[in-house]
Amino acid sequence: MNLLNILNKNKTHTMDTSIYKNKKSKIYFSGLRRDIINLIDKGDNRILEVGCAKGNTGYALKKEGYAKEVIGIELMQEATKEAEKKLDRAIYGNIETITLDFEENYFDYIIAGDVLEHLYDPWKTIQKLKPFLKEDGFFIASIPTIRNFKILFNLILKGEWNYVDAGILDKTHMRFFTKKTTVKMFAENGFEIVEIVPNYDIITYLIPGKHINGKLINRLTFMLFEEFLTIKYIIKAKK
C-alpha cells in the first residue's frame, strides 16, 4: 500500500479548519491575485475560483471585464460570507468533500490560487473539477515549489525543516511540489500546459541592506537557477 492510500484510509475527509484560524486575514484571505488575473483573457467568461477567500479576486475579474459570472468555493465560513457580497455565488465547504452541482462544460476558467498544496488529494480534486470546464477551457493554479534555494539550504546544510505560519513551508500545507511534478500532475489528468510563470523570491543577504528580486539574478545567471530562485509557479493548463 503506497503512502497516498494509507493517508486516504486513515482520514475522514473532514479538514480541521482550526489550523487556519490564526492566519492574518489581510494577507491570507483578502489578497487580490493579480498574478492569476494576468493569465485570463478579457471577455464574457464564466469563472470558478476554488479558494475564493473574501472574493476580492473574483470581484476584480467582474469589475475589470474578465468575467460575466464568478462563482467561488471557500473553506472558511466567515470569508465565504464576505465573498457572497461580491460574487455571483459563494459556496461554503471543503472542495474535496462537497458535491458540486454545476453543469458539465460550464466554466471557461477554473482558478485555484495556492490551494492544491493544502489538499489531501489534489490529483483527485483536479479530476473532480475537470468535467465542469469547457473543452477549450483553462485551469490556472499557483503552487509553491519546494526546490527553492532557502528550503534546500536549510535542509541540506543545517538539517532543518521548520514549518512556519506562511510561505513554502506553511503549517497548513499537506503536499509539496516542484515545477516538474506540478506539470506532471496536470499532464496526468489530460491537461496541456500552455504557460508557466515563476513568482521569484526576494534575495536579502547578497548585498547588506538591499533587496534583490530573484528574477534579476536568474537573468544574470542565464536562467540556470530559475527554480531555486522561485517561490511558486503559476500554471495555465488547457483542457
Image (tube, rainbow, N blue to C red):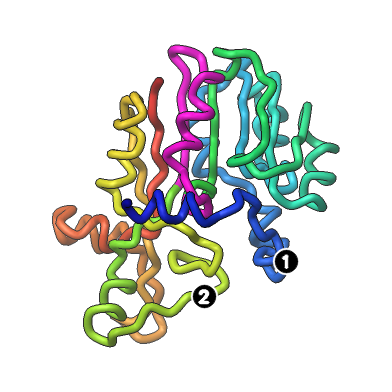
| Left-right relation of 206 to 71 | left
Which amino acid, mark 2? Val
Magenta segment, which residues?
A: 117-142
Which mark, residue 164?
2
Contact (Cβ within 8 Å) of mark 2 with mark 1: no
| Left-right relation of 12 to 173 | right
Residue 136 part of the magenta segment: yes
Which mark, residue 21?
1
**Which residue shows up at 61% across the image and 38% down it?**
50
Residue 1 rendering spot, x and y as whole percentages = 32, 51
Determine whether 173 is above or below 152 in the image.
Answer: above
| Left-right relation of 214 to 162 | left
Residue 206 rendering spot, x and y as whole percentages = 29, 80
Q: Quadrant of the C terminus?
A: top left
Residue 20 or residue 209, whichever sits in front: 20
Q: Give the distance between the C-alpha atoms of the residues marked 2 and 1, in whole angstroms.
A: 14 Å
Determine whether 76 is above or below 221 in the image.
Answer: above
Find numbered disc 2 in the image and state the secondary structure of the residue it sits on: loop
Q: Sequence order check: which comes first, mark 2 or mark 1?
A: 1
Residue 81 rendering spot, x and y as whole percentages = 84, 45
Graded by Cα atoms within 10 Å as few (under 14), some (14 to 19) or many (20 or more), the crowding at tag 1 reads few
| Left-right relation of 136 to 222 | right
**Which residue shows up at 26% across the image and 56% down it?**
227
Which amino acid, mark 1? Lys
Residue 181 part of the magenta segment: no
Instruction: State the image quarter where residue 60 is shown.
Output: top right
Find numbered disc 1 in the image and state the secondary structure of the residue it sits on: loop
Instruction: State the image quarter where residue 184 is shown.
Output: top left
